[in-house]
Amino acid sequence: MKNIVIFGAPGSGKGTQSEQLIAKYGFEHISTGDVLRNEIKNGTELGKTAKSFIDNGQLIPDDLMVNILASVYDSFGKEHKGVIFDGFPRTIPQAESLEVVLAKMGKKLEKVISLTVPDSDLIERLTGRRVCT
């Protein structure tokens, strides 16, 4: 089982590269943005707590985010081929917390992939996503 972190700036292709790895190797995928939207939409306790931070313009505390991600990770069961963490962790304390949670599950991170894209390409990609008709 491989647990992989993929990170980069918004628009760097994290989602695209994750999709390719999923298609080729059958990994599960955890995107922090998707997870948060889903938890909030489903009205879970974790989602309600996260929403209260978001509604107040605050960042979600690392321990809450790690607990949410651990819950999602657990939902994949024991027989998955691995998980791609898309966009998380973003800081050293988040990485340390994720390693601790995975260790408690008897797992570890195998690889970290950093996507580096020139700023001009990022700007072009991101501005191309929003079009007003």
Image (cartoon, rainbow, N blue to C red):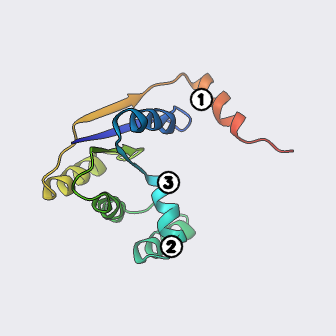
Could you tell me which quadrant the C terminus lies in?
Answer: top right
Task: Identify residue for label 3.
Answer: 33
Q: Which badge, 2 or 1, comes first in the chain's sequence?
A: 2
Residue 56 lies, in percent from the top left, at: 55, 70
- In space, the residues marked 3 and 2 are separated at their CA atoms by 14 Å
Q: Would you say 18 lies left or right of 107 here?
A: right
- In space, the residues marked 3 and 1 are separated at their CA atoms by 19 Å
Residue 34 lies, in percent from the top left, at: 50, 55
Q: Would you say 66 lies left or right of 57 here?
A: left
Task: Identify residue for label 2.
Answer: 42
Q: Nearer the viewer, residue 61 or 2?
A: 2
Q: Residues within 10 Å of mark 2 (few under 14, many from 20)?
A: few
Task: Identify residue for label 1.
Answer: 122
Tag 2's secondary structure? loop
Q: Residues within 10 Å of mark 1 (few under 14, many from 20)?
A: some
Quadrant of residue 49 within the rendered picture: bottom left
> Which mark lies nearer to you, 3 or 2?
2
Identified by mark 1, the residue type is: Leu
Identified by mark 2, the residue type is: Asn
- Whether residue 58 is visible, yes or no, is no
Residue occupying image coordinates x 65% and y 36%: 126
Q: Residues within 10 Å of mark 3 (few under 14, many from 20)?
A: few
Identified by mark 3, the residue type is: Gly
